[in-house]
Image: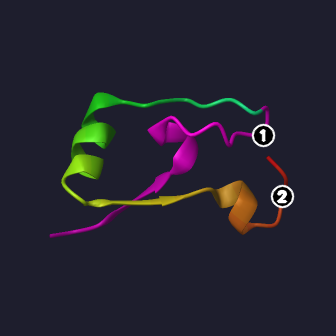
Amino acid sequence: MEKILVSRCLLGHKVRYDGGASGPFDPLAAWQAEGRVVAICPEVAGGLPT
């Protein structure tokens, strides 16, 4: 099974620069339930605050 790298804000996590989120979106939620999603926050990974 292929893994998919997805920003945490697209999964509904409130980690955007403004403290918000952009999701969750149904296709991403389905992939997450299948174990295909690798969630990451690019801002945090780059050392920026959220």
- The amino acid on which the numbered mark 1 sits, given as a three-letter code, is Tyr
- Spot occupied by residue 15 in the image (x, y as percentages of width and height): 68, 43
Q: Which mark is residue 1?
A: none
Q: How many marks?
A: 2
Quote the CA–CA distance across marks 1 and 2: 9 Å
Residue at image point 29% right, 50% down: 32
Comes first in the chain, label 1 or label 2: 1
Give the percent coordinates (x, y) of residue 23.
48, 30
Contact (CB < 8 A) between labels 1 and 2?
yes
Helix, strand or loop for disc 2: loop
Q: Residue 17 carries which label?
A: 1
User: At 49% across and 39% down in the image, what residue appears?
Assistant: 10
Q: In which quarter of the image is residue 45?
A: bottom right
> Does 29 sit above or below residue 20?
below
Quadrant of the snapshot with the N terminus: bottom left
Q: Name the residue under label 2.
A: 48
Residue 29, image quadrant: top left
Range shown magenta = 1-18
Horizontally, residue 15 falls left or right of residue 1, namely right
Q: Three-letter amino acid code at disc 2?
A: Leu
Which residue is rendered at x = 29% and y = 67% of the image? Answer: 3
